[in-house]
């Protein structure tokens, strides 16, 4: 591990060479000194073999180079090694093998609000958190007004943050983080917090950072955000770098691998599926059927369908909002339905196994899609969110009749019910002459 | 010193962590700053009643009460600093696993609260000495130097403990016991002269012995001047500090993995 300070304005910002990171599971890490002494005394008599069985390689043989000014997304399932990679690059933890060379000042955002102290006021925490993230006092002072404005909590600056709502807390924490201006920014999943409007604000800020020529490494399960922000993506799988290339291609490869293990029908959703949230409840099974509940292999054009989701709820959720999304394999969301759409009320979600179903008239064009299922609280906190829980196809044929999409290129993903007028001379109101169904 | 490498770029973090600790310490405590002053006074009173009255510990021309107060003033800094330093890494485990910064900042910043408390207690000590007609001589100007020596010694101990505790949690159980051992094996409540001559040198291997002796020399009017014991203690203290730095720098690499 070596940090070369100073920048030459171009060239390589991060160089990872054959990085390996081994964690030893079990009692060898930490523990009690007395145990270690007892262990040492035992092993003096009966030497243990040097090969420890509890070894776990979080990263193995990972190599890549990131050029200055590149915005790169790191994707992969939970436990694939993305976050460990960021920790190695940021020097939080040393690699077991290989080396990471970094050129320039590094700022790390593995979570927002690191170092926040509940007893201190909002103002005091801005300075403390800024310093923890590596900002100089002068820097924080010069950006203080901007930070406060971004967070939108001007009235509560002198209030201890323990009295803040969780939303205010997150906004303030992210505001500080968003004003960190290192040459290299490492970001992990911080966009998973806060309400939607705030998430949009944060994405905008990230784009600003990116456009100022800084290098950004961005770990997220939000594939849409990755594809919007990043040109390049790295796919991690089981501690290895599986793919490195243009973001749309790598995302498609990931979606295909994430969905390949799943079939149409009621399918188990593994713990290691790409998911995020507070985990008070977890999506366990998801299924796609016709609206009468009968099994279906693939959907026809215009066919309505039912998505059933089964959750394991660990903790009562008094008000839950379910979200069903249909996304392309590239991770772009095409259709979203929330259980509270059109002023419907949130539903209680009691402890234990709970199932919910939604009938959808999504009017999809032919193609391959994945289903995203989420459960949130009304304030936007995500309890569980699984992207690509199930993959399905829409065939280029209606169930009855000859309705199909005749061209090779399918543009877009949805064909909404539409009302077209007759063709007529361009004068007056087009719908006045009467319409066709 | 390897543990200090890269510290320059993070000096503001030391400042803000120290400020946090001091702010939190004095926010929401009933008697606030008085606590820092009350503690040595009450302890000195108790020890005066117990040791001064019952066993008649010799304290020279200085009344035993003042002798004990001076001892407690320095001891509370030492005990507070060792306690806070050794806790500093575990208390910031979240920060350690999420952000990179030179970890030595944590035990360094942990010295702030005991230092501020010491300042308050020292002021009261000097006022009481003046009020009772036991004003110290010009040696009192050397108090900052003695304080630096004390800070160096406790930082040395604190570096060892704060690095060890990350790996071995039972170190935190040993700290209160260690402090108790220090309290009685260091001439805090009794003068070093009470110890037989040939044991004084041996006892001075405890670096706190020199710290106590030097401190009493600076604030008490007729305390014996710093002798060989102070030199030995300073040497041991410097060794402790240097080895603490080296061990800490080695151990901090793995903090995020084991904390």
Image (tube, helix red, strand yellow):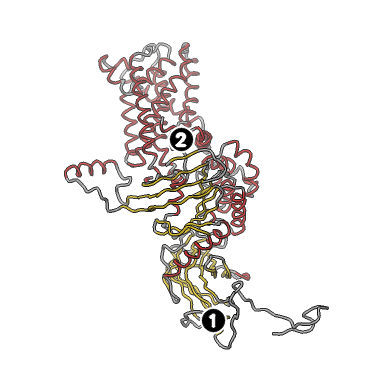
Q: Residue furthest left?
A: A45
A54 left or right, relative to A270: left
Label 1: chain?
A
| Percent coordinates x, y for residue A169 in the rendering | 56, 50
Q: Please identify the quarter of the rendering in which residue B59 is found.
A: top left
Q: Which callout, 2 or 1, points to the residue nearer the camera?
A: 1
B184 to A182, vertically: above or below: above
A366 to A245, vertically: above or below: below
| Percent coordinates x, y for residue A115 in the rendering | 50, 43
Q: Does residue B30 appear anywhere in the picture?
A: no
What is the spatial separation of the Cα atoms under label 2 and label 1, in whole angstroms? 63 Å
Mark 1 nearby-residue class (10 Å; few <14, some 14–19, many ≥20): many
Label 2, on which residue?
A: B105
A299 left or right, relative to B198: right
B140 left or right, relative to A212: left
Mark 2 nearby-residue class (10 Å; few <14, some 14–19, many ≥20): many
């Amino acid at each position: 591990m070596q940090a070369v300070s100073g920048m030459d304005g171009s060239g390589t910002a991060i160089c990872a060479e054959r990085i390996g990171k081994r964690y030893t599971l079990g009692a060898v890490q930490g523990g009690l000194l007395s145990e270690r002494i007892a262990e040492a005394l035992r092993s003096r008599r009966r030497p243990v073999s040097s090969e420890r069985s509890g070894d776990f390689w979080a990263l193995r043989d990972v190599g890549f180079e990131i050029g200055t000014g590149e915005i790169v997304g790191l994707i992969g399932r939970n436990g694939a090694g993305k976050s460990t990679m960021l920790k190695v690059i940021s020097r939080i933890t040393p690699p077991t093998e290989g080396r990471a060379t970094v050129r320039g000042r590094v700022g790390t955002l593995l979570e927002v609000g690191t170092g926040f102290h509940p007893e201190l006021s909002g103002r005091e925490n801005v300075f403390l958190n800024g310093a923890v993230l590596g900002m100089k006092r002068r820097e924080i002072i010069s950006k203080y007004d901007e930070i406060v404005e971004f967070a939108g909590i001007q009235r509560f600056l002198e209030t201890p943050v323990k009295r803040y709502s969780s939303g205010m807390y997150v906004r303030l924490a992210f505001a500080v983080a968003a004003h960190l201006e290192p040459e290299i920014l490492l970001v992990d999943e911080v966009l998973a917090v806060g309400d939607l409007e705030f998430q949009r604000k944060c994405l905008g800020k990230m784009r600003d950072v990116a456009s100022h020529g800084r290098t950004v490494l961005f770990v997220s399960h939000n594939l849409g955000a990755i594809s919007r922000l990043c040109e390049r993506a790295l796919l991690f799988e089981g501690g290895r770098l599986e793919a490195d290339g243009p973001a749309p291609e790598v995302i498609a490869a990931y979606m295909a691998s994430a969905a390949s293990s799943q079939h149409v029908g009621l399918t188990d959703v593994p713990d290691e599926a790409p998911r995020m949230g507070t985990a008070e409840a977890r999506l366990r099974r998801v299924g796609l059927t016709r609206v009468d509940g009968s099994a279906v292999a693939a959907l026809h054009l215009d066919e309505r369908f039912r998505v059933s989701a089964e959750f394991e709820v660990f903790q009562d959720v008094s008000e839950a909002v379910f979200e069903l999304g249909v996304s392309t394999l590239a991770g772009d969301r095409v259709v979203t339905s929330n259980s509270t759409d059109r002023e419907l009320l949130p539903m209680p979600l009691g402890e234990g196994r709970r199932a919910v179903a939604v009938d959808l008239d999504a009017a999809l064009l032919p193609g391959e899609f994945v289903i995203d299922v989420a459960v949130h609280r009304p304030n936007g906190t995500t309890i569980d969110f699984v992207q690509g829980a199930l993959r399905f196809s829409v065939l280029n044929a209606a169930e009855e009749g000859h309705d199909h999409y005749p061209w090779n290129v399918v543009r877009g993903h949805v064909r909404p019910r539409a009302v077209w007028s007759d063709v007529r001379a361009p004068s007056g109101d087009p719908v006045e002459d009467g319409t066709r169904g | 010193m390897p543990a200090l490498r890269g510290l320059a770029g993070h000096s503001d973090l030391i400042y803000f962590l120290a400020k946090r600790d001091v702010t939190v310490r004095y926010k929401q405590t009933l008697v606030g700053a008085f606590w820092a002053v009350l503690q040595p006074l009450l302890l000195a009173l108790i020890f005066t009643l117990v040791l001064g009255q019952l066993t008649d510990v010799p304290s020279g021309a200085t009344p035993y009460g003042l002798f004990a107060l001076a001892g407690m003033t320095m001891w509370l800094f030492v005990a507070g600093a060792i306690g806070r330093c050794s806790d500093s890494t575990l208390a910031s485990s979240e920060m350690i696993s999420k952000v990179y910064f030179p970890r030595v900042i944590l035990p360094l910043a942990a010295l702030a609260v005991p230092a501020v408390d010491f300042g308050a207690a020292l002021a009261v000590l000097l006022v009481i000495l003046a009020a009772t007609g036991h004003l110290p001589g010009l040696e009192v100007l050397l108090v900052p130097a003695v304080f630096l020596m004390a800070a160096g010694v406790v930082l040395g101990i604190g570096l060892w403990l704060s690095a060890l505790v990350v790996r071995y949690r039972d170190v935190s159980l040993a700290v209160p016991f260690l402090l108790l051992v220090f309290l009685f094996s260091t001439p805090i409540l009794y003068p070093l002269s009470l110890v037989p001559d040939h044991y004084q040198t041996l006892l001075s291997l405890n670096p706190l012995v020199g710290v106590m002796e030097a401190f009493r020399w600076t604030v008490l009017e007729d305390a014996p001047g710093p002798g060989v014991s102070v030199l030995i203690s300073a040497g041991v203290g410097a060794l402790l500090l240097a080895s603490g730095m080296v061990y800490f720098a080695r151990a901090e690499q793995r903090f995020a993995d084991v904390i």
